[in-house]
Amino acid sequence: MKQIFVQMSSRLTRYGAGTTITRLRVEFLLAALSGLVIVFLCGSLFGNAGGVAAACGLYVLGAAVAAFAMHRLYPHTEFGVCNLITMSRLSLTMALVPLLLLSRPVAPSDLWIAFAIAVIALSLDGVDGWTARRTGLASRFGAKFDMEVDSVFALVLASIAYQSGQAGPWIIALGLPRYAFWAAGVLWPRLTRPLPDTLLRKSACVLQIGTLTAFLVPILPGNVLAFAAATAAAALACSFFTDIRLLLSDTP
């Protein structure tokens, strides 16, 4: 897949306006377009044309924000498979949006489709960072892109859990910690300082998204899901408390 991606990019840059169309821009465009196809095809499985259109629009908006951030933070000339994976996770996340806009009750079959899509997206989480380090393409952009996709993914999953009746409105809180932390950073700028990677933060994020994915399984007992949600919430609280204490200390 990587060879095909690079070959297409090379041909487009060779025959295009070489001085204005760089390899990075072409590879980003190819990745964004392939992601749009994923949103359309996977989102169409829910049989909601209006929802698919909304999902595609949100995906294009997300890709535009990523392009702006890449222009500011990405130091490499190659987009790379690592960022292609993250873009694919964004497209799979947006493919779940039509489920939130159904004009009919959510059926168990809808949840099973959403579960399959979510499992694929979850299985790719972490692969992008590992690939970036292996290929020498790690960057602030890649780390931020990955984090923001995780945040949107968690919020979409929490919204589906509520929309489908799998959980009460309290489940939305499990998808909001990242945005609550961002809002706190607006009030207290010290909270916006960079943080080192920690196993606790990564584990809490995986537990959060894994738990929210489990809410898509219609046959799991409600008490089991509630216990898993409480465990994930406790892990997130511990992770955020540790980060906040570090950020408010004298050493960043």
Image (cartoon, rainbow, N blue to C red):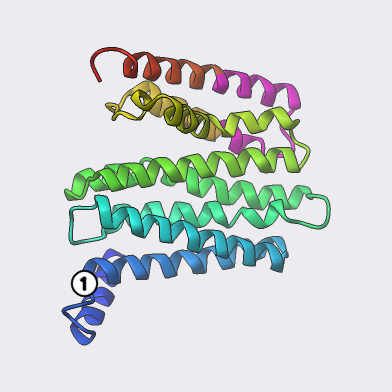
For the residue pair 40 and 172, the one nearer the viewer reads as: 172
Q: Is residue 150 left or right of residue 194?
A: right
Q: Is residue 183 left or right of residue 103?
A: left
Residue 229, percent across and down?
62, 24
For badge 1, the amino acid type reads Thr
Question: Helix or strand or loop: what does disc 1 sit on?
Answer: loop
Q: Is residue 76 left or right of residue 141?
A: left
Residue 15, percent across and down?
21, 87
Establish if 30 lies above or below 191: below
- At a point 68% along the width and 48% down the height, the residue shown is 112
- At a point 23% along the width and 76% down the height, the residue shown is 21
Residue 123 visible (yes or no): no
Establish if 73 lies above or below 22: above
- At a point 52% along the width and 30% down the height, the residue shown is 180
Residue 45, percent across and down?
66, 63
Residue 152, percent across and down?
52, 44
Q: Quadrant where the C terminus lies?
A: top left
What are the residue bounds of the magenta stretch? 211-233
